[in-house]
Every structure is written in structure tokens, then in C-alpha cells.
Image (cartoon, helix red, strand yellow):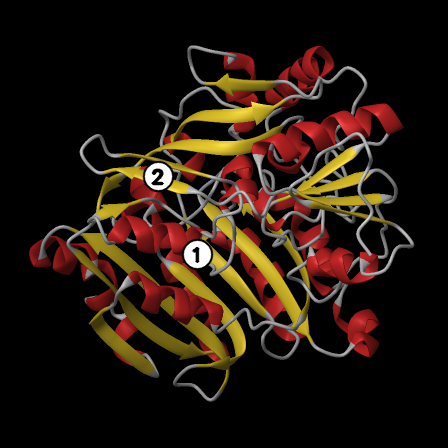
């Protein structure tokens, strides 16, 4: 049975705790099968912007704090809180595309891979997230590290405006010229943002002419050689290439524990592609790879499928991460311990070469570094929670002295608070929240640095 507040003409649906289907809908807000034992008082599934406004007003009337869910891919389930109102905006997924102006709009509930496909049909491109099903709402708010991001920057840099519902239940537009404080905060506040986004306005780009990847794999016995090489070549790798190292107990071509070196490339010519991948294909290290491919043409859907091999559905996940610029000699002891304690697949470790440029615009997003390291534990049986759930947290806690911060996409702030924006930007976020949401209607992060 659906319970609807008599004063609110929802087109969407409302489920109060204790009512039939409440638990089904609560669990459905999570992609991670490891659903936290946190229970909102009310779940509202919005279909329209009007629903969002009415839900915020309902929360204010009943003294409820608000959590917002767009796609449910938050590993930690940041949107699921005890008490309050959970506002599900996955139904707001309309997309418009202006090919000539290279502009697009999208609701927060549109999956990034779907947006990429829609743009691709018009030879356009946007740095959508690497995983299928991740909706743009949370992805863009936390920064947005996606395809071709080393060249185009975090996806939030390409957000040129937002339609928002404030803590007062007012619909406003935010951009560099209008409600600039909210525009600044929306690009990087992540799950601590204190408004509901109902529409993003995006700058989009010409689709790269060449898309594909190079690949090499090595047994775990080559760990030091592989990571020394990656740390050394990282600063010189073309921005057209995303150099990723994936450590797993079932590496392709190895048949056991090893490291997969995956290098997606986005280029405009064959010559540019060849030059961009030379660092990998001409390296001495690559000559001894267990499996290697100099270049495999691949559509974006194929790249998505390759990534999702490491993130199967219906699994329980625990995740943690760090940014770092530490020397490889300092990082190696932690990497060796990670390898020695690595759980079975789909558990894996991601090392992403990044190197932030110095010309980022002024926005809440403010923590990134040369290297990104993320740990993903995945398992199916709830009885194995104790065995696997603490692995990412413990390993990242041990390496925390080498970290410059964490990325909100893979945050574990409830278990291990870490720096996710600079101190100055955190203070500025607090000030804007005080002005815009003085009663703290919206939940903040589950932990702070």
C-alpha cells in the first residue's frame, strides 16, 4: 500500500516505514547488495520537479532531514540514513541535446552510459563515469572521474548550470552568474550538498575519432617492477590515455594473481593514438608481459563491459581509497601488503595515473593528486562480511600517512574520515550551508576530515 500525505499531490510515490513494500523500496535504493541497517521514516519516489518541491516542504513540515538518491551506486549508501526522508530522484531522467551549440541537459536519474550513448549518436561526447548504471546526479556532485577525464577534467568542470530545489522548497537556477555560491558548492560537495538537483546543464564535446585500448598483464611476482614503471612514466603519459593498473587474484593471461595494465585511449587520429601508447608498447617491461595487445579498437559500450567485469551485480561491496604523490619506495610496502591480503575476485585494486593540472576553476572540488589508489572488496555471502568488509578500510588506514586525501566517488567516510576537499573549501562549504540550509534540513557527509 502506498501512503500519500493528503496535502501533497505527488505524481510519484511515498512509502512510510512499516507500510507494505517499504522494505522492498528501501533495499532497491542500493546497487550494493550490502544494504546498511539504516531506515528512513519516509521514502519518496519523485517523478517530477514538483514532486521534489513538495517532498522538501513535507520534510520541513514534519521536521525530517533529507537524504537524496539518484542512482544508488554510493558504495556506503550515503543516502540511507536512520530517520528522516529519503528522496529518490531516479525518475528525473529527461535528456535534451543541442548538437550545434554543444550543450545538453540531463536529469540526475539518467545513467551515464545511457547519456554517453545518446550523445554518441550525434557524434558528441561527455566524460561520463566508468561503470554502467551510475547515474549522473551523485557522479557530477562529487567531481566525476570518467572516460577521457585526464584531457577534459573532472566532469563537474563541464557543468555550466543546475536547476535546484533549496532547503526552503524554492526552485532556483545556479550558474557562474546566478546563485554563484550554490554553483560553486555543487561542483564538489558530493553527498554533503544541501539542495536537490533536478537538472544539470552540460558543456559537451566532439566525439573522439579513435577509441580503444592497449593491454598488458603480469604475474604478481612482478609487482615491484610494474608499479615502479607506472610511477616513473606517469608524468609523461599523454592526457589522451588513462593508465590503469588493476591488481587481482585472477589476472587475464596469468591465470592467477597478477596485475592488468589497461590503457584506454581517446584520440583524433591513428598517428596520435600510436604516439600516445608508445610509452607502453615500446617499454622494456612490456616485452615480458604474460599477455599483451598493442591496440584494440573499442567502442565506449565495449569499454564499459570491460570495466564491469570487475563489478558484477548482486555482490556485497566494501570500498576505500586515497590520493597520493608519495615516492614509489614509500608506497611499495603498502602495495605488497595489499597484494598479500587481497581477497578473491571480484575484489581488486585500482591504480589510476592522474596528475592534476594547475588551472582548475574555483569550485568546491579541490583534492586530487598524481596517483589514485582504490580498494574494492566484493563477495556474495553475508556470512563473509566479517572476513572481507574491513580489508579496504584497514589497508587504507595503514597507508593514510602517504595520502593527500580521498575521492568522494569511493568514499568510506563513515568508517574512515579523510580529507575530501581543502580546509579552506570545507570552511566555505560550511558557511554556504549556514546561509542556505541553516536548520540542516539536508544530511551532510557521514564523516569529516
Q: Nearer the viewer, residue 406 or 28?
A: 28
Report how far apart the C-alphas of labels 1 and 2 lie in the structure: 22 Å
Q: Is residue 150 above or below residue 158?
A: below
Where's residue 193, x and y in %?
A: 64, 29
Q: Which residue is at the far right?
A: 18
Disc number lying in front (1 or 2): 2
Left or right, 114 with respect to 183, comes to left
Q: Is residue 11 above or below residue 318?
A: above
Q: Nearer the viewer, residue 46 or 245?
A: 46
Q: Quadrant of residue 226?
A: bottom left
Q: Nearer the viewer, residue 283 or 26?
A: 26
Which residue does the image show at 47% across and 61% down from the upper left? 132
Q: Is residue 187 above or below residue 150?
A: above
Residue 233 in sight:
no
Q: On residue 292, which mark appears? A: none
Where's residue 334, x and y in %?
A: 62, 60
Where's residue 116, x and y in %?
A: 34, 52
Q: Which residue is at the far bottom?
A: 255
Q: On residue 130, which mark appears? A: 1
**Mark 1 neighbour density, 10 Å: few (under 14) some (14–19) many (20 or more):** many
Residue receiving disc 2: 96
Amino acid at each position: 500500500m502506498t501512503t500519500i500525505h493528503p496535502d501533497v499531490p505527488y505524481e510519484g510515490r511515498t512509502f512510510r516505514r512499516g507500510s507494505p513494500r517499504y522494505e522492498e523500496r528501501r533495499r532497491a535504493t542500493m546497487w550494493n547488495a550490502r544494504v546498511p541497517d539504516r531506515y528512513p521514516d519516509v521514502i519518496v519516489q519523485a517523478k517530477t520537479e514538483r514532486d521534489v518541491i513538495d517532498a522538501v516542504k513535507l520534510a520541513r513540515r514534519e521536521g525530517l532531514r533529507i537524504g537524496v538518491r539518484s542512482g544508488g551506486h554510493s558504495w556506503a549508501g550515503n543516502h540511507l540514513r536512520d530517520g528522516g526522508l529519503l528522496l529518490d530522484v531516479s525518475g528525473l531522467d529527461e535528456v535534451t541535446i543541442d548538437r550545434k551549440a554543444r550543450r545538453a541537459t540531463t536529469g540526475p536519474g539518467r545513467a551515464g552510459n545511457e547519456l554517453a550513448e545518446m550523445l554518441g549518436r550525434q557524434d558528441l561526447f561527455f566524460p561520463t563515469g566508468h561503470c554502467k548504471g551510475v547515474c549522473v546526479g551523485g557522479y557530477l556532485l562529487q567531481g566525476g572521474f570518467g572516460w577521457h577525464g585526464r584531457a577534459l577534467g573532472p566532469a563537474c568542470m563541464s557543468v555550466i548550470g543546475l536547476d535546484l530545489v533549496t532547503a526552503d522548497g524554492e526552485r532556483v537556477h545556479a550558474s557562474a552568474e546566478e546563485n554563484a555560491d550554490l554553483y560553486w558548492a555543487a561542483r564538489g560537495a558530493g553527498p554533503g550538498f544541501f539542495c536537490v538537483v533536478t537538472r544539470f546543464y552540460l558543456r559537451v564535446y566532439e566525439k573522439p575519432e579513435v577509441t580503444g585500448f592497449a593491454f598488458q598483464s603480469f604475474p604478481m611476482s612482478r609487482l615491484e617492477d610494474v608499479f615502479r614503471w607506472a610511477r616513473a612514466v606517469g608524468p609523461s603519459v599523454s592526457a589522451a590515455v588513462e593508465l590503469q593498473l588493476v591488481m587481482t587474484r585472477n589476472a587475464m593471461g596469468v591465470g592467477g594473481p597478477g596485475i592488468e595494465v589497461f590503457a584506454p585511449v581517446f584520440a583524433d587520429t591513428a598517428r596520435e593514438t600510436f604516439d600516445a601508447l608508445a610509452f607502453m608498447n615500446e617499454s622494456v617491461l612490456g616485452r615480458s608481459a604474460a599477455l599483451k595487445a598493442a591496440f584494440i579498437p573499442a567502442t565506449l559500450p565495449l569499454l564499459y563491459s570491460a570495466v564491469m567485469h570487475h563489478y558484477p551485480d548482486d555482490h556485497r561491496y566494501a570500498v576505500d581509497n586515497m590520493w597520493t604523490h608519495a615516492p614509489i619506495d614509500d608506497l611499495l610496502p603498502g602495495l605488497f601488503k595489499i597484494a598479500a591480503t587481497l581477497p578473491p575476485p571480484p575484489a581488486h585494486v585500482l591504480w589510476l595515473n592522474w596528475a592534476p593540472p594547475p588551472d582548475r576553476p574555483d569550485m568546491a572540488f579541490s583534492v586530487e593528486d598524481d596517483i589514485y589508489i582504490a580498494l574494492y572488496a566484493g563477495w556474495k555471502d553475508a556470512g563473509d562480511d566479517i572476513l572481507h568488509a574491513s580489508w579496504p578500510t584497514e589497508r587504507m588506514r595503514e597507508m593514510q600517512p602517504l595520502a593527500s586525501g580521498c575521492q568522494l566517488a569511493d568514499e568510506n567516510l563513515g568508517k574512515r574520515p579523510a580529507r575530501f576537499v581543502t580546509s579552506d573549501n570545507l570552511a566555505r562549504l560550511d558557511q554556504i550551508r549556514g546561509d542556505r540550509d541553516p536548520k540542516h534540513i539536508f544530511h551532510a557527509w557521514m564523516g569529516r576530515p
